[in-house]
Amino acid sequence: MNIQGLIIQLLSGISSGMVIFLIAVGLSLIFGTLKVLNLAHGALYMLGAYLCYWISCQLSDLGGSFWLALFFAPLIVAIFGGSIEYLLLRRIYNREPLDQYLLTFALILVIGDIIKLLWGVDFNMVPVPWPLNGPFIYMGYVFPRYNLFLILCGPIVFVGLWALMRYTRLGKVIRAITYNREMANALGTNVQLVYTAVFMLGCWFAGLGGTLIAPLTSAMPGMDMVILIECFIIVVVGGLGSLSGAFIGSFIFGMVNAFGILVFPRLAIAFGFILMIIVLIIRPWGLMGKPE
Amino acid sequence: MIKVIGKGKTGRLSTWAPIAIFLFAGLPFVLPLSWLSLLTEMLILAIAATALNLILGYAGMVSFGPAGLYAVGAYTTALVLIYTELPFWLAFVAGPLLAGIIAIVVGWFCVRLTHVYFALLTLAFSQIIYTILFGWYGFTKGDDGIVGIPIPKLLQSIPNYYYFTLIIIGISLAIMWMIVNSPFGKTMQALRENPERTEFIGINVRVYQLSAFVISGFFLGLAGAVFCGFSKSVFPAYAHWMKSAEMLVVCLLGGIYNFLGPIVGSLVYIFLDKIISDFTHYWPLVLGLVIIALLLFLPGGIAGAIAGKLAMRSDKG
Amino acid sequence: MLRVENLRKSFTGHVAVADVSFELVEGKITSIIGTNGAGKTTLFNLLTGHLKPDSGEIFFKGKRITGLPPHRICKMGIGRSFQKANIFPRLSVFENIQVALMSWAKKSRNIFLRSKTLMVNETNQILENIGLNGKQETQAGLLAYGDQRLLEIGITLGSHPDLVLLDEPTAGMSPEESKGAVKLVQKIAQEMNLTVLFIEHDMNVVFGISERVRVMHLGRIFAEGTPEQIRANKDVQKIYLAEEN
């Protein structure tokens, strides 16, 4: 394979890794604070993608419709997520993990079919927005601009979230609750409200990821489960609940995936799982996680 | 908050069992073939779900990957029948045996973890199994699946295979019932309740969990083998996490703290699936709403609710 | 019966148990007291195999048990009750104790017997001894907390231990219940010729039945003697006064 091909493959791997990072970080955040593994996370990502498509279509006469979608779609997903948390999730916080898995699984079914109802089963393409729809040429090689944009998004979000956790009041409260819920409660923090906020934030990330990926892969059925399984692998490798872990895990996964497809196309899907199995056997709490 | 489990006072086994057997044995004389076929499918699902519930409800281990072992059972039987001249009964026994062996290997790794990590590792292993079945075209015929599997003439008619399934499920349930009511079964429940305490009454927790996992895997493989003979075909989808999810939902529907729960769940699930699918394309939506409603309003599942009502009545009366 | 030599355990930066050595004589009831964080529960965890010591040795009935897993140590004859009511909530009171007895009788692996019929008399005997007779069918999680602690002790007895480690057996009990629990421990220890070592905060309990008292502070055994000697010990008083402040 020539260098140009390698570059494309590399960029593709890293940029998809960065998008998965956005979704994985939401999943990890929700698990770290609420102690719930949100199986519906992929479905919310898919919702974001479809909303992006829909908003772009509705407002296609206006210039910059994608950018409007980028603003609104994640917001809508976050609000939707907040209502789910308020109406349903709250009631199962103290229940068995199995009940939590089944509830969030049921949401996958419901959200998936609602999307099917509203938008059908076709692939819904979203055009790559100006000014990112073109190549960036450097040293005679072509770098697709949109992929570069996605690669930038990853670190921006990472730094933003890190700053939020470290320096803002909300971040400190989240960390306190993650560390010791009873204590935080006793100190007067409205734990319930923070749970809702964290869940909404996680959903916002999922929606953002979906919106960003839509121009690249289009909004299509089945994307929810593919991304969910990939997220599982990443949060296991990086460490459930760890921000930097999700970042490193996404990077590793993006690379393993991109080159796995090159080398062993038919078994490439297994690579992620083998990675997951190895980590779970040797170091179950992941690279950056803490043993329980 | 402790969930009060309606103690399964669903009546003495010795009065119910013969009635049930009589009923089920008589059904081929009244039901049309398509219903009988559906019923067979439900019975096979019931074996798988009860097997899953051994570790789910009794041992408290949530697995995301029962379909993997189920598929191992199905594919082993299929491959033996396709590639060798061995008789059906040997191929049939090979299914659960290989599933049990793989369960030993997979289980050994998985029981070293708990809770969400255990669940994710079981998922990873079953997805590996799926990938092997999907990708190893030369041996397993990949996505095409294996069709036209030869089974003995005696089992080829629907009523006959129904009786075969009935016998298998009868024996399987009897064995699983015995296990669940044995000291081993009680110890498993203690493990579910409080693994730390169980360790300190002298139980090697890992060994017991692995044993339960293997027994469960054996019967999952058995269900797969029966299904292989029923549909005379196998596909990689048998190992997919969607199938695992189906088994978990069935257990929830019926109630995991009740031996008969998974059986009730399979009946309701297959029944619902058939009816709803005839009406609408949106079966997943309906199923999702049903699950949510169940979780919020009927936490013990259907069997749990019935058992609870019966317990209340016996308290009053 | 139990001999501990130079036991040491530290967690990142914090030494929980530092160079602890002592010996327990068969048949006596002794206690360990100390302020919070003195290392008492960590010591228990080391004795029962829940934690591995950094260094030091533990001998039980002459055999070396350092580093063995908890289930092996239990089978050798050490029983333990935990600080919070560590029971099997959804099993009945009867089953809670029965399951311990079945393990002791080496029947737990059996898949052929009907568990309902096993060890019935022995289970009822223990229930009688701890005063929970008549509550066989109650779900353990629904018992009052005091009863749960009693059940906890009952489960421990089900393993037929020779040495019983009680971790704050009266924690969370009313003064009434504490008195009852103390009498019970004394009675059972006498009847079954048990060696008992318990951790306690409540001084009345300690001075009531303990034949020998050890005081732990900052991971070390600081003082040792009869209850009267300890009560009179000025240094011990200082530590406890400091805690009250």
Image (cartoon, rainbow, N blue to C red):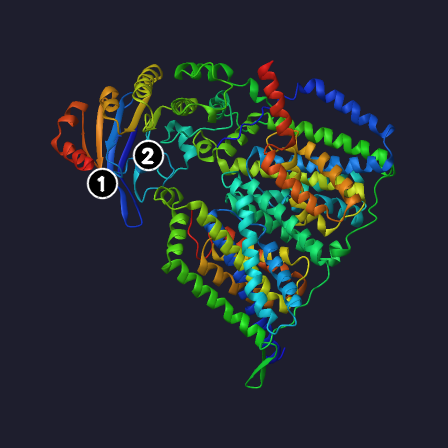
Residue A133 left/right relative to B43: left
* Residue C130 sits in quarter: top left
Residue C200 left/right relative to A60: left
Identified at 75% across, 37% down, the residue is: B271
Type of amino acid under label 1 = Leu
x, y (%) of residue C175? 29, 21
Q: Distance between the residues labelled 2 and 1?
A: 15 Å
Tag 2 residue:
C44
Q: Mark 1 lies on which chain?
A: C
Examine the rendering and report whether any part of residue B271 can be seen: yes
Looking at the picture, do discs 2 and 1 lie on one chain?
yes
Residue C51 left/right relative to B248: left
- Tag 1 or tag 2, which sits nearer the N-term? 2
- Pick the residue in front: A204 or C43: A204
Q: What kind of element bears circle 1?
A: loop
* Residue A166 position (above or below residue B191): below
Type of amino acid under label 2 = Phe
x, y (%) of residue B289? 65, 43
x, y (%) of residue B222? 71, 38
Examine the rendering and report whether any part of residue A276 can be seen: no
- Pick the residue in front: A213 or A197: A197
Tag 1 residue:
C218
* Residue A32 position (above or below residue C172): below
